[in-house]
Image (spheres, helix red, strand yellow):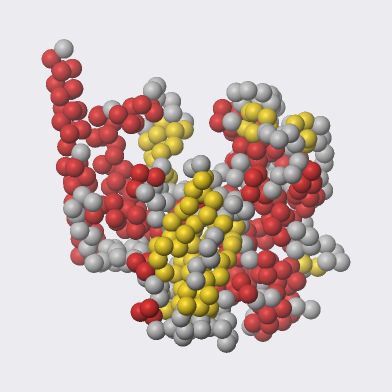
């Protein structure tokens, strides 16, 4: 359940003011770095304590970053002693030293990763009986995973390279995921959605030149229509971006037809 | 004794099929998955007593902690190995899914996630072997007792309500407060009525209140005493 009550005037630390990245050794996450933590616009008392917490499932580790007036990130934010370091999320807490109340907070922060390392749609292969593909929302925070039927011969190769598969499946996957975001989960903010993976998908869509509306609601007919139009525009833009795959599919189909 | 193994994808698939078969045909024969390509030996070598019977989840978790300690393995080295937990569930399957009707060999079989260790955030904590170990290796005795008092084949409401919530299960002081509130250490089981939705201060109410505290206080630095002191009067009856 999403909780947004704020009786204590706790301030929100905007995502754009926090940047965290993983440090890897031999490809494995061993530590993280806080590249940016800007609290200047929040008007916090200078002696407020600042902490960064790394967490995932049962794991939790806190790092003391001194005070809001003099932030000092520990030189080594070691996470070698945590299980699932690749999956860690982060929260920032600013605490009133006099009564232990939270003055400011940000949660669910994912580390910045080079684009090629971060997949917004992991793919798994399993027996789906007579179904070709299915999207299941069982990733972190309910994020989507594309399940493709492992009974199909050479399916791993087909899923990666076959133009017909790409043009048939991926536009519909995108439509499915965007519809889920808007009409199942609901979007509380299109600029800083509280569900982390929503933000990743909205950013993904922006790459194709489709602007995300200020709101993506489902509570009235106009909002629904606007949201559906945005979804359609997004799918169209995706298909246009990969028009070479469509051309390849047409070419192969014509060749087979002539044969 | 048998050396600890890690279930591989083909073994997991066979194990899953066996579980599914048992639901319709209780006499299905358990496949031998203690060889490649179904499983592979874990390194370093860890000896496991496949015939050992556990009276509670706590006993199972203590046993595994001891095995891993002797092998010099830390929780962060073993927890992410889903195949290891799936294999342990396979080895101890007879007590994790016990026969309930000897005449028909019918078993008490629960959903797959209780036996096949999953990365799914919705049910990773439900696995009947990794779940208890994950809690015990973090919270130890006596605080883990509130989650691990029940038989190895039974999932309980304390795990469902508390262990499913990252913020709660990862805070040792909150878990200590839960243990102090709801566990009867003389009877070695939860206090009666803790799970009853109609009772003031029941475990679901505790979750709601802690979720409010999470957004108000720096819980991490508080002692369990301080957390208990902050609770509203509806919880007073449980503090005795």
Farthest residue in the right direction? B186
Left or right relative to A104: residue A171: left
Residue B100 visible? The answer is no
Q: Quadrant of the N terminus of chain B?
A: top right
**Left or right: where A16 falls relative to B149:** left
Q: Residue reaching furthest top?
A: A259
Which x, y percent locates residue A147?
41, 38
Percent across and percent down for residue B39 are 63, 28
Q: Position of residue A252 (x, y in %)?
A: 18, 22
Residue B198 placement: quadrant: bottom right
- Please tell me whether residue A117 is drawn above or below residue A14 in the rendered image: above
Q: Is residue A107 above or below residue A134?
A: below
Q: Which residue is more in the foreground, B152 or B104?
A: B152
Q: Nearer the viewer, residue A33 or A205?
A: A33
Q: Is residue B125 above or below residue A44?
A: above
Count numbered badges in the picture. 0
Which residue is at 77% across, 67% downward?
B183
Residue A133 appears in view: yes
Residue shown at the point (72%, 55%) measured from the top left: B136
In this image, A43 relative to A161: left or right? Answer: right
Percent x, y of residue B236: 71, 81
Viewer-side residue, A193 vs B79: B79
Q: Quadrant of the C terminus of chain B?
A: bottom right
x 51%, y 84%: residue: A47
Q: Residue at x 24, y 29 (%)?
A: A163
Is A2 situated above or below A146?
A: below
């Amino acid at each position: 359940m999403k909780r947004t009550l704020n009786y204590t005037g706790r301030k929100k630390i905007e995502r754009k003011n926090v940047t965290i990245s993983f440090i890897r050794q031999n490809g494995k996450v061993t530590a993280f770095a806080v590249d940016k933590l800007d609290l200047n616009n929040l008007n916090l008392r200078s002696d407020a304590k600042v902490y960064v917490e790394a967490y995932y499932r049962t794991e939790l580790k806190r790092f003391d970053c001194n005070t809001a007036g003099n932030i000092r990130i520990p030189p080594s934010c070691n996470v070698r002693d945590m299980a699932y370091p690749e999956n860690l999320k982060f929260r920032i807490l600013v605490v009133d030293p006099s009564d232990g109340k939270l003055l400011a907070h940000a949660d669910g922060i994912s580390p910045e990763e080079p684009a090629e390392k971060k997949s917004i749609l992991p793919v798994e292969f399993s027996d789906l009986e007579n179904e070709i593909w299915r999207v299941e929302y069982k990733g972190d925070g309910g994020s989507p995973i594309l399940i493709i039927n492992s009974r199909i011969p050479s399916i791993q190769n087909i899923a990666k390279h076959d133009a017909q598969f790409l043009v048939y499946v991926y536009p519909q996957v995108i439509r499915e995921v965007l519809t889920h975001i808007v009409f199942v989960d609901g979007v509380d903010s299109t600029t800083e959605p509280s569900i982390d993976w929503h933000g990743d998908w909205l950013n993904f869509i922006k790459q194709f030149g489709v602007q995300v509306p200020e709101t993506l609601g489902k509570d009235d007919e106009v909002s629904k229509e606007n949201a559906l139009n945005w979804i359609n525009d997004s799918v169209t833009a995706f298909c246009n971006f990969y028009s070479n795959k469509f051309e390849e599919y047409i070419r192969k189909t014509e060749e087979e037809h002539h044969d | 004794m048998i050396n600890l193994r890690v279930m591989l994808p083909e073994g997991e698939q066979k194990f899953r099929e066996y579980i599914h078969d048992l639901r319709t045909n209780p006499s299905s024969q358990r496949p031998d998955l203690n060889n490649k390509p179904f499983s592979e030996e874990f390194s370093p070598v860890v000896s496991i007593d496949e015939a050992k019977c556990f009276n509670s989840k706590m006993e199972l978790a203590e046993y595994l902690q001891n095995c891993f300690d002797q092998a010099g393995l830390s929780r962060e080295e073993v927890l992410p190995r889903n195949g290891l937990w799936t294999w342990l569930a396979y080895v101890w399957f007879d007590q994790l899914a016990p026969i309930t009707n000897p005449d028909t060999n019918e078993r008490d079989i629960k959903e797959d996630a209780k036996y096949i260790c999953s990365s799914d955030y919705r049910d990773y904590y439900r696995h009947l072997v990794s779940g208890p170990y994950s809690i015990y290796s973090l919270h130890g005795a006596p605080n883990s007792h509130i989650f691990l008092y029940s038989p190895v084949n039974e999932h309980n409401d304390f795990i469902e309500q508390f262990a499913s919530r990252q913020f709660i299960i990862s805070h040792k002081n909150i878990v200590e407060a839960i243990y102090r509130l709801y566990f009867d250490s003389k009877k070695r089981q939860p206090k009666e009525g803790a799970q009853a939705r109609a009772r003031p201060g029941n475990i679901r109410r505790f979750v709601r209140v802690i979720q409010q505290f999470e957004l108000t206080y720096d819980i991490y630095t508080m002692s369990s005493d301080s957390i208990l002191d902050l609770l509203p009067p509806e919880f007073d009856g449980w503090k005795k």
